[in-house]
Amino acid sequence: MINFDKLKQEYDALAKKLSAQDAVKNRQEYTSVAKRYAYLEKVLKLCEVREKYLKEEKHLTAIAADSTESEEMQSLALSELKEIRAKLAKVDEEIEEKLFEDDEADRDIIIEIRSAAGGEEAALFVASLFKMYSHYADRKGWKQEVLSSSPTEIGGFKEIDFSLRGPKVFSRLKFESGVHRVQRVPVTEAGGRIHTSTVTVAVLVEPKEVELKINPEDLKIDTYRSSGAGGQHVNVTDSAVRITHLPTATIVACQDERSQIKNRAKAMRLLKAKIMEKIERDESDKISQARKVQVGTGERSEKIRTYNFPERRVTDHRINLTLYQLEAILEGDLDPVINELVKEERKKIYAAKGLT
């Protein structure tokens, strides 16, 4: 349960701060305090509505339980009680959404999926995860664009990078970074034995233009001929692009487009996202603080989820969640997993902020 008194105390303290004579001396601090004050004001207005509903609920519950009241009055009270509880549930949801508003929620992201252990079987599972995220994006109305891929001859991918744009895309998919493990009988296995393969997923926030400026002199750009699965459609010109950022030794490549210019543009987007990730990872103090309220660390070395085909089971190891809905999840019905991860993260944030 949220401790609304704590929020009210903070709101009152900020009000005093804003009304102080020297409040505007530090313009940056004043702006920050004013923004937080306005935000809390919206939350507390919702809390006032909630309190009103709670009083009505208490009153109606008493009438419904009062044996001296007529059956008609009790029936009417029960009917209104149902409506009030629906309103309470809705305002509780609005308060929770407001409390967890995230400046990063709507940021565009780039997802990298890489085959790890398991050879062709891992590459096929990269394709399965790409399909899963694609279908999930379709359900949410997000825009998707493949930036780079390395397909295999039997329909898998050694690796694939793609961008997603849309409302709450980062807040919904930020939990996907880590090692995804698949247990199934490979199509290439004649003996019918279950194999375990692994795939790594990284979710990168795509930096805005103002956030990251790259000096062209720090880049080494190579062009080469596209290769890989594709038969007669493989480009025979030097349209593929490899870019190396010399200061960070970050390397990206793109060969999906037939145009060198398009491949270069996509590679630059991918490069910027990777450099931004490195910069943020280097800010160790900031990251360690943030991880106190995260569900898992999000490191690629961490095994976060297992997809077990014989048992039709998906297990998220961070929150000990097991669902026997493998087919639905792989078809993009990810909300049952993500909703539980969001709930767990919010519990930790409540505790960290002293709101419980």
Image (cartoon, rainbow, N blue to C red):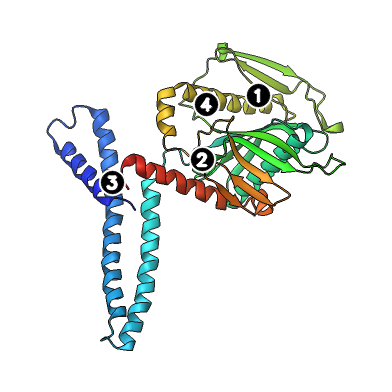
Q: Earlier in the sequence, mark 4 or mark 3?
A: 3
Relative to the observer, which residue lies in front, 206 or 83? 83
Tell me which numbered mark, 4 or 2, is placed earlier along the sequence.
Answer: 2
The kind of residue on which mark 1 rests is Arg
Helix, strand or loop at mark 3: helix
Q: Residue at x 64, y 42 (%)?
A: 306
List the residue tagged with mark 3: 40
Q: Is residue 147 visible?
A: no
Of the image marks 2 and 3, the number of the one nearer the N terminus: 3
Please state if 248 lies on the left or on the right of 61 as rendered.
right
Which structural element holds mark 2?
helix
What's the mark number on residue 264? 1
Question: Foreground mark, 3 or 1?
Answer: 3
The local secondary structure at tag 4 comes to helix
Read off the residue under disc 2.
170
Q: Nearer the viewer, residue 219 or 127?
A: 127
For discs 1 and 2, the disc positioned in front in the rendered view: 2
Q: Is residue 22 left or right of residue 141?
A: left
Three-letter amino acid code at the position of disc 4: Glu
Indicate the position of residue 73 as horizontal and vertical percent values. 30, 85
Whole-angstrom CA distance, mark 4 to mark 1, is 20 Å
| Label 3 vs 1, first from the N-terminus | 3
- Report the residue marked by disc 4: 277
Question: Marks 3/1: CA distance?
Answer: 45 Å
Tag 2 and tag 3, C-beta contact below 8 Å: no
Q: Label 1, secondary structure: give it.
A: helix
Name which residue lies at 71% across and 24% down: 260
Q: Please tell me whether mark 4 or mark 1 is closer to you in this view.
A: 4
What amino acid type should be assigned to the residue bearing mark 2? Phe
